[in-house]
Amino acid sequence: MAAHARTSAVVGLALVASVTAACSGGGGSHSASSTPPPAAASHASAGGGSAPNSPAPTESNPPGDIPDNQVYVAYRPGSGTFTFTGFRVKVPEGWARTEQKNTTVFTDKLNTVRITAASVSSAPTVGSVTHTVVPQLKAQVPKFAQPKVTEVTRHAGRIVLLTYQGDSGKDPVTGKVVRDASERYAFYRSGHEVDLTLSGPVSADNVDPWRIISDSFTWK
């Protein structure tokens, strides 16, 4: 009877050990299947990073970019503002307009189109703009920099172009100051000069809109 009891005890212990090992192995296998490996989790994040019902990210143009579908309308100066009215130029439709003697300004958000006319004794040249206009703007435009004067061709013919950078005035609401890039075109005919200045943030891509406007200038 004693030998039989010892045998039963050994068999019982063996069964307990077997069951314990099986449970331990099953638990580890279940844990691996319920938790994705780090690589899989990383891949899921890179694939979207948002819940399936979240809206798609909204894309927007950089600040100051003029929309591709912008409409342009002809601007003809009136005698109430300009002493010389023999020209016209296309400007963006819907922009705010302000006027003072011989100057009209169109603005929208961060962009500006400034048109100024004056009677002059001679046509502007690269030299005259470099030695006269550049110092004037340096005194007027905050942090004026990178002036470059060249001759370019537009629909109206050969004209003098001055490009430069400077800080804008403070926004009356936000107080922010924007770094602007400007193009100043000097058109001349028969003792009359019209300066067309196009300004917007340096980060904006307005090459095409500025070309549309500067190329639209014509003498009447």
Image (spheres, rainbow, N blue to C red):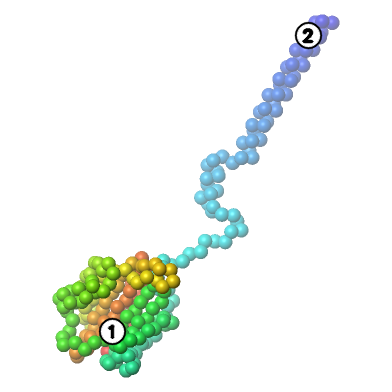
Name which residue lies at 66% across and 35% down. 30
SS under mark 2? helix
| Residue 165: x %, y % from top left | 28, 69
Q: Residue 54 lies in what quarter of the image? A: bottom right
Between residues 8 and 104, which one lies in front from this camera angle? 104
Viewer-proximal residue among 77 and 14 = 77
Type of amino acid at the residue the image marks with label 1? Thr
Quadrant containing the N terminus in the rendered view: top right
Q: Report if residue 205 is visible in the image.
A: no
Is 46 placed above or below 106 here? above
Kindly identify which numbered label has been placed on residue 6: 2
Residue receiving disc 1: 116
Closer to us: mark 2 or mark 1? 1
- Residue 93 lies in quadrant: bottom left
The quarter in which the C terminus is drawn is bottom left
Tell me if residue 104 can be seen. Answer: yes
The residue that appears at 41% across and 66% down in the rendered structure is 62
Counting residues from the N terminus, which is met first, the one under dot 2 or under dot 1?
Answer: 2
**In the rendering, at what x and y percent does residue 85 appear?**
29, 92
